[in-house]
Amino acid sequence: MVSHTDLDQDNIMVADYGELPEADRQAFEAQLEDLRQKMASCYRKTRQGVIKQEEFTLLVDNKSKCYF
């Protein structure tokens, strides 16, 4: 007999962003804003108004609770 606590990988759906608990959404948004700032800091604007991208390495925070 199958228990309701057993997880069937074929019966799991990805949660919609709006379904996440408020605390998790706030943490996600904070990390997203930090990523935006880090990526934007890799661009420079010359005095002539030309925007150039510098090379950068994207570091990923492995503290996330989500594992693949």
Image: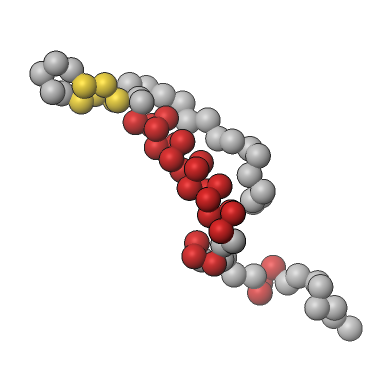
Most extreme residue toward the bottom, as rendered? 1
- Residue 24, given in percent of the width and then of the height, sits at 58, 54
- Residue drawn where x is 46% and y is 43% of the image: 32
Q: Toward the viewer: 52 or 16?
A: 16
Given the current orientation, which residue lies at the most extreme left position?
Answer: 48
- Classify residue 11 by image quadrant: bottom right
Residue drawn at x 24%, y 24% as measured from the top left: 52
Q: Residue at x 59, y 61 (%)?
A: 21
Kindly give the residue lying farthest to the right in the view shown: 1
Q: Which of 10 and 12 is in front in this view?
A: 12
Residue 50 in percent (x, y) is at 15, 23
* Total numbered circles: 0
Residue 59's place in the image compared with 46, above or below, is below
Looking at the picture, how far across and down is residue 59, in whole percent? 52, 30
Q: Which colour scheme is used?
A: secondary structure
Q: Position of residue 28 (x, y in %)?
A: 52, 48
Examine the rendered structure and indicate whether residue 7 appears above or below residue 56. Answer: below
Q: Quadrant of residue 49?
A: top left
Q: In which quarter of the image is the N terminus?
A: bottom right
Residue at x-position 47% and y-position 31%: 58
